[in-house]
Every structure is written in structure tokens, then in C-alpha cells.
Image (cartoon, rainbow, N blue to C red):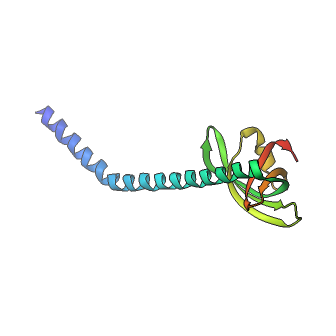
Amino acid sequence: MGFFKDIKKLNDQGKEMREQYPVQDQLANAQASMAQANQMMAQMAASSAEATAAMTNGVDAFATVTTAQQTGAMMNFNPVVDLDLLVMLPSGVPMPVRRQEVVMQMYLSRCQPGSRLKVKVDPANPTGLWIDWATPA
């Protein structure tokens, strides 16, 4: 009779676990996380296309980091950083730009507020820019 008692005990434990951790909530959380990840990837792909255009057709400029904050996301073990930049266009007009950028760990020190970065700005799309992390400004 101990076998049937153990099966009943396991069945009761299973019911209790289903009540404490509903599958529907876990599925909804997983879908929300996936939607957020897809949105971030689409945003990064769009900014990558803008950066490529700026790199090939852009003019040299400088940007000053006003704020920088890590998002908590990582790509190839490099953090994704929210950057607020003040870009000085070649015409002398300052323009604020906000973007998410994957920053290699060795360049994270350049993301501090007040740091100057060398950038290339696309004249057709001033918000599209490419940051030259390797060259000091």
C-alpha cells in the first residue's frame, strides 16, 4: 500500500506546484521578454545600417558623451550601452543624439560623461552616425 500512497503524495505535490507557478504566467513572461529582445535587435539593426551609411558617406565630427548607462544586455560578451551624445556638426551646430551601442569592454572608459568621441555623421541623415572607438578624439 506504500506505493499508492507515494503516488498520491507526488500527485498532490504536482497540483501544489501548478498552483504556485502557473504555466500561463511563465509563458506570458517569456513572450514579453522575447518581444522586448526582438525590438532591441531591430533597433540595433537599424542603427547599424545608419552607422554603415555614415561610415561610408559621412563627414568627420566630434561628439561629447552627456550620459551613458549600461542596459544589462550583452552581445558577444560586450555590454550594450545607452548613450546620450552632443554631436558638433561640421557647420558648428550642436545636435543631441541618443543611441544604443555595443561597446567593446576595452572602450567602456570612453563612455564616461564629458568624454569626446570621434564620429562620422551622414550629411543626408544627421542622426545616423558612426563612432570611431579606436581613434582617440
Q: Nearer the viewer, residue 71 or 75?
A: 75
**Residue 22 visible to an observer of this rendering:** no
- Give the total of numbered labels: 0
Q: Position of residue 10 (x, y in %)?
A: 23, 40
Residue 128, picture quadrant: bottom right
Can residue 37 be seen here? yes
Residue 7 x, y percent position in the rendering: 18, 38
Q: Residue at x 82, y 54 (%)?
A: 59
Instruction: Using the rendered view, name the quadrant where residue 65 is placed.
Output: bottom right
The answer to whether residue 10 is left or right of residue 135 is left
Please provide percent x and percent y for residue 69.
Answer: 70, 54
Quarter assignment of residue 125:
bottom right
Q: Considering only vertical position in the picture, is 42 above or below 75?
A: below
Look at 74% across and 52% down and name the residue there. Answer: 54
- Please give the name of the residue rendered at 80% of the width and 65% of the height, measured from the top-left corner: 95
Q: Is residue 6 left or right of residue 28?
A: left
Decide: is 68 above or below 102: below
The percent coordinates of residue 114 (x first, y second) are: 85, 56
Q: Nearer the viewer, residue 57 or 4?
A: 57
The residue under the point 84% across, 50% down is 118
Residue lying furthest left in this view?
Answer: 1
Q: Nearer the viewer, residue 40 or 55?
A: 55
The quarter of the rendered structure image containing the N terminus is top left
